[in-house]
Image (spheres, helix red, strand yellow):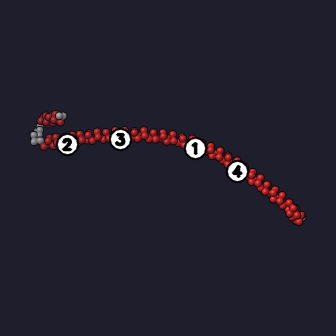
Amino acid sequence: MLTLILQFIKKYWMYIITIIAVVSFVFHYVGLKNKIEELKEINIDLKNKVSTLEGQITACQQANETFQNEIQKFNQSISKWSEASQKQLKEFDSLKNKITSSQATIASRVKEIINNPNKPQSCEDAIKYLIDVGKGLSQ
């Protein structure tokens, strides 16, 4: 049996190699064709993903512009509040100076009253004295 097979191969070896080569080529061709189809599908999928991502990028850019506009509005608002705050601080400083001046005046008057050599001796004199002092404070 082995000799029969060897004789067959010896006689038809060119045909056998040709058939093997043709079959290999066909399988290789079919494999490449399937690979090309897979790559086409992948390409279509990637194009869809790119399109989706481009839409998302556009949406992100619009959201970014909106966000920047809101930040600018917020910064303007902060600037206005800062200006108002500085104005109030100046007004508080002015009021503080007025209060300090008034306190100094009152302290000076109180010292005058305490150190006055003509202190009232009677209740009536004390009332007259307080009325005069009140008139002096209102000036």
Instruction: Answer with left or right where residue 138 lies relative to residue 70.
Output: left
Residue at the image point whose x is 62% and y is 43% from the top: 48
Which numbered tag is attached to residue 35? 4
Disc 2 and disc 4: Cα gap in Å? 98 Å
The quadrant of the rendering that contains the C terminus is top left
Residue at the image point whose x is 42% and y is 38% from the top: 73
CA neighbours of label 1 inside 10 A, class few (<14), some (14 to 19), many (20+) = few
Residues under numbered marks 1 and 3 in contact, where contact means CB atoms less than 8 Å apart? no
Disc 1 and disc 3: Cα gap in Å? 42 Å
Which numbered tag is attached to residue 104? 2
The kind of residue tagged 2 is Ala
The residue that mark 1 highlights is 53
Which numbered tag is attached to residue 11? none
Q: Does any portion of residue 127 appear in the rendered image?
A: no
Q: Secondary structure at mark 2?
A: helix
The residue that mark 3 highlights is 82
Eye-nearest disc, 2 or 3: 3
